[in-house]
Image (cartoon, helix red, strand yellow):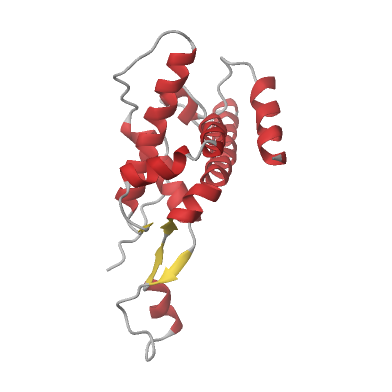
Amino acid sequence: NELYQEKLREIDLRARDLVCTTFGQQIGAEVDEIGLFVQQINVTHKLCTLWEKWVKKSKITKEQDLAKVIYGMIVFYLRHRSKQNGEYQKDVHPPSEPVKALTCTIYKMLPRYHAADVSLENTSKTSQHHHRRHVLHRKDFIDNFHVYLYRAHDQFVLDYEDMQNAKRSGKDSSGVNDFALPPKLEKIT
């Protein structure tokens, strides 16, 4: 796969200790490394097994369900990497803020569908927009989850570069680098 080879070259060229994002600083791995890992395990159909273990339904519509999958994927990757390095760590607990930020970013990327239980015939276009849900189907997870991770990584790199540029120009005098969470998604009822 061309995308896989391109990301593999990009990650190999990057120094292992070079941090591209705040996420990478806090988790100890960049999002694109996790995406590459997802592509690798998809070859062995491991993603099907993970979906069945973590989700147990045909689709995800809630951000908190997606957060469980992303948290599990991060832990799975960090354990795998520590095992490869000969320092297997069973108890891996990534911090919650970067996991929340990644979840929110990916959730916004998911396709939106009309909520099945809402009648939209006599509602305005604005009102119809509020009855649409972000949905991650099992097939989309298996076929495209790595792409969502790569796109999220690209966004995090841009955010990190903007933060670094702001620090250099003196706009950030606090010296504190908190992880900037994207705006909270509106709750759809």
Q: Quadrant of residue 186?
A: bottom left
Residue 75 appears anywhere in the view: yes
Q: Position of residue 95 (x, y in %)?
A: 33, 28
Q: Is residue 17 left or right of residue 73?
A: right
The furthest residue to the front: 44
- Quarter of the picture holding the N terminus: top right
**Residue at 36% across / 42% down in the picture?**
69
Name above or below for residue 120 compared with residue 95. Answer: below
Query: Considering depth in this image, is 144 or 47 the residue closer to the camera?
Result: 47
Q: Does residue 79 lie above or below 61 as drawn?
A: above
Q: How many marks?
A: 0
Of 113 and 185, nearer the camera is: 113
140 left or right, relative to 72: right
* Residue 16 rendering spot, x and y as whole percentages: 58, 16
Q: Position of residue 117 (x, y in %)?
A: 30, 77
Residue drawn at 56 percent across, 14 percent down: 17
- Hey, which residue is sitting farthest bottom in the picture? 122
Q: Is residue 178 visible?
A: no
